[in-house]
Amino acid sequence: MKDISAIEVTRKCSLKSALEKLENSGTTVLLLVNEEGILLRTVTDGDIRRLLLAGFGLEDKLDKLADKSPVVASPGMNPESVIEMMDRYAVSQLPAVDQQFKPVDLYLRHELQPRILLSVPHMGDYERQYVEEAFSTNWIAPLGPNVDGFESELAAYVGSGHAAALSSGTAALHLALRLLEVGAGDVVLCSSFTFIASANPILYQGATPVFIDSAPDTWNMSPAALEQALQSLARRGITPKAIMVVHLYGQSADMDSIVALSEKYGVPVIEDAAESLGAYYKGKHTGTFGTFGIFSFNGNKIITTSGGGMLISNDRQLIEKARFLSTQARDPAPYYEHTEVGYNYRMSNVLAGIGRGQLKVLDERVASRRAVFDRYRAELGDLDCIEWMPEPEGDLSNRWLSAISLNPEKTAVTAPALIEKLAAANIEARHLWKPMHQQPLFAGTEYYSHGEESLCDYLFSTGVCLPSASNMTEKQQTTVIQHIRRLLT
Ligand SMILES: Cc1ncc(COP(=O)(O)O)c(C=O)c1O
């Protein structure tokens, strides 16, 4: 129970003292009581701001506030009923009063309802078994049977020839660039609408990124913008060293068009499939169209090893070279000899054990994430201000994150406002990725837009990722849906 007297005020309290009390209390609500201590109404900083805007001064008193009968709960109510009440009245704090209507407690949503998170790890039945095996056989070091098993099982799952298990998806991207001999002064074409990890390795190699907008049918790399970039660079006598295409939020880019352009201009493709493991483009797994594909097993991904990545390719020699470079490029000599720069990028045998267990439940995880997206769309589809991330016919997104955009012509609610309001209800939602060409790190970098208006800029300013974990309960989904409906209607 809280010290309620610390947030009680009377009508004699000045706006200034009320603001100070709010500041010091750690809550966002005060309880206005009469001389007998009976609750008259709640006071938020919004109420005080409105008085100030109406022309009252900081020394004016709270008696300027109109009466407003408060919504209250009873002491000792079960948390579920309190949350239900909070949902019904769209509030995140609820005073509890005794029989005389005197406040005795203040329920806070964040104390009663665990935060509904965007994406969390979801373990299956076998991860522990593989990890225990690593312990019992003392294969704790990097490499070992789980690493070999994870590589071959993942390669078989996606239908790729070969795979190298690494410490992160970023490491996999870096090795892909290195193996394509991208170096200082080279140009790499890269999706602008992505996470920084797609672009950073281009800088590690001293190369220059040129960013490409998204297309409306996939929200991923626009073939039209890509062709413009290739043509423009060709006119200047520049052949890029690679095309880094990203499959965001589990949706494939238009690979037929991108591969056709890569062949026409002789530029190899690296697929950043960090977010799209388990997704298909025309019946084939994302990550298997380019010279290289990469996956991430970061903690927030569809399956996780807590941290890790995989580089895949149909070229055995390239993957063998990746394994060599990722273990400090040690030459085959009886002592430690090195002729090339290497990295410490290998995955540990313990973490690979988690990966092997996770791989067994990947199809279930895809089905669960798709079900979350489908439920959002089924229950909010009537709100015409919501644009849903597309999934062209013939593709199968893993719906890693349920991504939407709010059409500003159809709602006054902005993406930041929706995210903030959901946060107040203890629901985590996030902006879509801020495009790379807008990042201070890449100021002045060349960028090719899909049309007159840059699509990824529009998606960044209007887009929201909703909670999408595969272990989200139906109740949690209902809570998210109710809040969004209330906030958007
Ligand atoms: C699109 C994209 N690329 C690359 C990465 C990098 O993966 P990692 O965190 O495993 O280095 C991530 C995720 O973190 C990602 O979302």
Image (cartoon, rainbow, N blue to C red):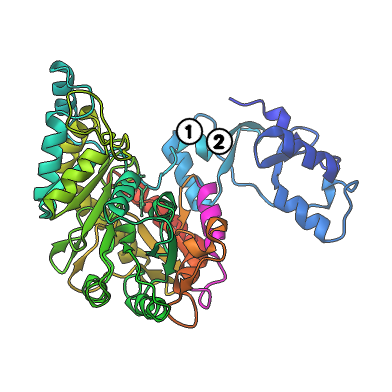
Res. 66 in view: no
Specify the quadrant of the image occupied by residue 16. top right
Q: Residues within 10 Å of mark 1 (few under 14, many from 20)?
A: few
Q: In the rendered structure, which segment of residues is drawn in magenta? A: 407-425
State if disc 2 and disc 1 touch (CB < 8 Å). Answer: yes
Circle 1: element type: loop
Q: Position of residue 25 (x, y in %)?
A: 70, 33
Q: Position of residue 488 (x, y in %)?
A: 50, 65
Amino acid type assigned to the residue bearing label 2 in the image:
Tyr
Can residue 11 be found in the magenta stretch? no
Res. 122 in view: yes
Q: Identify the residue at image location x=17%, y=21%.
A: 139
Circle 2: element type: strand
Q: Could you tell whether 344 is left or right of 1 in the image?
A: left
Task: From the image, tell me which residue sits under label 2.
Answer: 107
Q: Is residue 188 above or below residue 48?
A: below
Q: Nearer the viewer, residue 181 or 169?
A: 181
Task: From the image, tell me which residue sits under label 1.
Answer: 77
Q: Is residue 446 above or below residue 340?
A: below
In the image, which is nearer the foreground, mark 1 or mark 2?
Answer: 2
Q: Position of residue 9 (x, y in %)?
A: 77, 37
Q: Position of residue 19 (x, y in %)?
A: 78, 42
Q: Residues within 10 Å of mark 2 (few under 14, many from 20)?
A: many
Q: Could you tell whether 383 is left or right of 354 in the image?
A: right
Q: Identify the residue at image location x=40%, y=62%.
A: 186
Q: Identify the residue at image location x=43%, y=52%.
A: 200
Real-space Cα separation, disc 1 to disc 2, in angstroms: 10 Å
Can residue 423 be found in the magenta stretch? yes
Quadrant assignment for the N terminus = top right
